Image (cartoon, grey):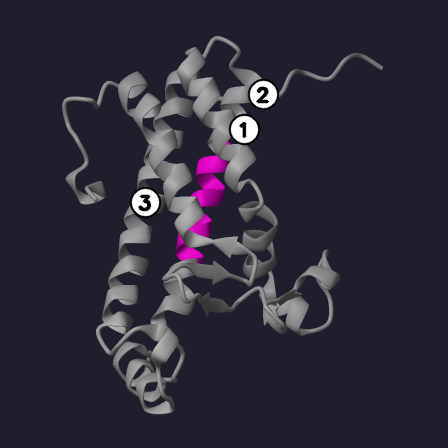
Amino acid sequence: MGKSAPKPVPSLDMAILRAEGWIAAALLQAKRIEAIRAAQQAFRPVVSWTMKDHEAAYKALALPGGCLVEDYDSHFFLFAIRLALRWCEIILEAEPSAPDDVRTAARELLASIGHAKPLRDIIEHEDEYLAGGGKRPGEYTVEAFGMKSSAHSVMMMGTGDRLLGGRFSVNDAIAALRRALPPFVVAVGHEGEPPTFLDA
């Protein structure tokens, strides 16, 4: 048998452009999570909420069926991160000619928030897990702070952070994404067009 043809890969320029776009998209989605967080905090600090505060927050921030909007917006955040990480993987695997600062940013992003990938995959196939299947049945729920937390859950921490699925820090992810973005922006040539929606 002959050797199989090499797997086609996107161009370096396209890989960097897509990585930049998905990192920025994840940060934009984070802004939505922060807006929801601000609305929740408007009631009073979460750590001192009474049952009435919880009920008021759910009423203000819930979908008609009673599910918190944040539970779903947070998952779009994970999806954008997963695609950003995939393009970073492509840059590192197939593009040794990428600029050093881009390769460093890609490596650091994968090292710091690469654990978003299995969580995102579990959420995408949640129907299988809820039916008793799934590729990682033992990972659908985890023990976090003395309670069981499903992959779908969003835990509000007293620090103002959110833990997605009881295991993924929103604040840590935002910090990692912000650190990673600048080299991609420069490489793509967007440095003259700062994304104002990402301003702190």
Read off the magenta span. Answer: 75-86
Q: Secondary structure at mark 2?
A: helix
Q: Residue at x 38, y 74 (%)?
A: 47
Q: Quadrant of the N terminus?
A: top right
Q: Position of residue 57 (x, y in %)?
A: 30, 81
The dominant secondary structure in magenta is: helix
Residue at which label 3 appears = 27
Near mark 3 (Cα within 10 A), the count class, few <14, some 14-19 or many ≥20, is many
Residues under numbered marks 2 and 1 in contact, where contact means CB atoms less than 8 Å apart: yes
Q: Secondary structure at mark 3?
A: helix
Q: Residue at x 35, y 74 (%)?
A: 46
Q: Amino acid at mark 1?
A: Glu
**Residue projecting furthest to the front:** 48
Residue at which label 1 appears = 89
Q: CA distance from mark 2 to mark 1?
A: 6 Å
Left or right: where 64 falls relative to 169? left
Q: CA distance from mark 3 to mark 1?
A: 19 Å
Question: Sequence order check: which comes first, mark 3 or mark 2?
Answer: 3
Residue 161 picture quarter: bottom left
